């Protein structure tokens, strides 16, 4: 930009050199400065040694001084990247029942249908607490990533934690963020699906031995084993504590700046089953996650 401004100034001076000696000196100074930096429009002949150093310095100052000011004033600021862009727009939900099985539709065909309906983000289930592989169907995941990205669709991986085995839940979650397909594709985001109490219920289930009353079939002391489910209050307390621990460890385990989503039930579902969500750690969700995704489907 400074060179353009200087050339324009030189042209104006050349067109009006009849104004006097001062203008001609300025014109000479500008051309000498251009000669110093090797500009193709500079004068071919060189001035006498020692007679133009002050003019050269003045012209060089004229070239350098306005450059920074002009550049800073005219260069548009580069907008910061949107950290939650992968979660914006129309999304579609695909769980582990929809792919990886002999009867499943080809992932490429699913992606084509999503693209035709204007879907911008595919939420793809990668695993759940009751299954040991961190990524259930890598072949299907690879196909979804490749075809979705080719169609301009982002892919957010989601995992269903049980909160009874936090180590397992955390390992499977981090596997999504570290996943790379054979073609070099990655997930564009990650979000746990926070809703399932069944792992806590199973973990709290235990067997007790009870005495039976004497009778014809039990002339002496008789006992029986009975499976006892944990109380709903205990289940909720352990569920909420598990969410808090998992969320804290997940945030601590990912690089700074990683965008994390939290998939939760919508307000209407909470109202229908209010007792199901007593003590739900909403403050922890707000502190550990960047995006909250209520499951308000239609």
Image: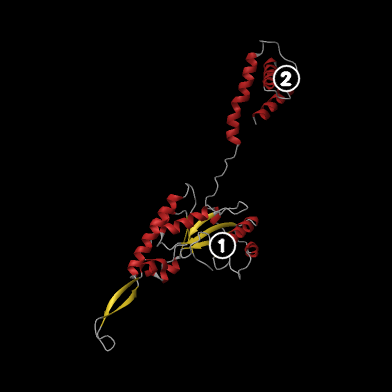
User: What is the x, y in percent for residue 149?
Assistant: 62, 55
Q: Quadrant of residue 273?
A: bottom left
Q: Is residue 60 above or below residue 128?
A: above
Q: Is disc 1 surrounded by few (<14), some (14 to 19) or many (20+) residues within 10 Å? A: some
Q: Secondary structure at mark 2?
A: helix
- Comparing 293 with 23, the one in front is 293
To which residue does mark 1 refer?
137
Quadrant housing residue 224: bottom left
| Along the line of sight, the residue nearer the viewer: 69 or 104 | 104
Residue 181 image position (x, y, % from top left)? 59, 54
Q: Earlier in the sequence, mark 1 or mark 2?
A: 2
Residue lying at the far front of the rendered structure? 220
Q: Position of residue 121 (x, y in %)?
A: 57, 59
Determine the CA span between mark 1 and mark 2. 79 Å
**Image quarter for residue 284?**
bottom left
Q: Residue at x 65, y 55 (%)?
A: 150
Which residue is depicted at the point 69% across and 22% down? 34
- The answer to whether residue 261 shows anywhere in this view is no
x 35%, y 63%: residue: 238
Classify 10 Å Cα crowding around label 2: few (below 14), some (14-19), many (20 and above): some
Image quarter where the N terminus lies is top right
Say if 270 sits above or below 250 in the image. below
The foreground one among 55 and 49 is 49
Residue 13 sits above or below residue 278 on the image: above
Is residue 154 visible to the viewer in this orientation of the structure?
A: yes
Query: What residue does disc 2 label?
Result: 17
Say what secondary structure mark 1 lies in.
loop
Q: Position of residue 177 (x, y in %)?
A: 52, 53
Circle nearer the viewer, 1 or 2: 1
Q: Quadrant of the C terminus?
A: bottom right
Of 227 and 144, which appears nearest the observer?
227
């Amino acid at each position: 930009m400074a060179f353009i401004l200087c050339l324009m100034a030189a042209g104006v001076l050349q067109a009006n050199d009849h104004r006097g000696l001062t203008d001609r000196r300025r014109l000479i100074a500008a051309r000498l400065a251009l000669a110093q930096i090797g500009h193709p429009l500079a004068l071919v002949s060189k001035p006498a040694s020692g007679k133009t150093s002050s003019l050269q310095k003045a012209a060089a100052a004229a070239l350098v001084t306005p450059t920074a000011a002009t550049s800073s004033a005219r260069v548009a600021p580069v907008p910061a990247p949107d950290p939650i862009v992968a979660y914006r727009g129309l999304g579609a939900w695909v769980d582990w029942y929809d792919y990886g099985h002999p009867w499943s539709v080809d992932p490429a065909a699913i992606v084509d249908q999503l693209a035709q309906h204007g879907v911008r983000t595919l939420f793809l289930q990668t695993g759940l607490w009751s299954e040991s592989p961190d990524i259930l169907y890598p072949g299907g995941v690879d196909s979804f990533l490749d075809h979705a990205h080719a169609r301009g669709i982002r892919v957010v991986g989601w995992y269903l934690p049980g909160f009874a085995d936090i180590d397992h839940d955390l390992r499977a979650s981090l596997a999504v963020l570290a996943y790379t397909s054979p073609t070099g594709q990655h997930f564009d985001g990650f979000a746990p699906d926070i809703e399932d109490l069944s792992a806590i219920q199973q973990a709290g289930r235990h067997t007790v031995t009870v005495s039976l009353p004497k009778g014809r079939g039990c002339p002496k002391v008789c006992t029986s084993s009975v499976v006892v489910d944990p109380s709903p209050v205990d289940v909720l307390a352990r569920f909420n504590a598990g969410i808090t621990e998992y969320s804290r460890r997940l945030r601590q385990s990912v690089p700074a700046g990683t965008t994390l989503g939290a998939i939760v039930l919508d307000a209407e579902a909470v109202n229908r089953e209010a007792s199901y969500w007593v003590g739900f750690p909403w403050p922890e969700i707000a502190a550990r996650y960047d995006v909250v995704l209520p499951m308000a489907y239609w």
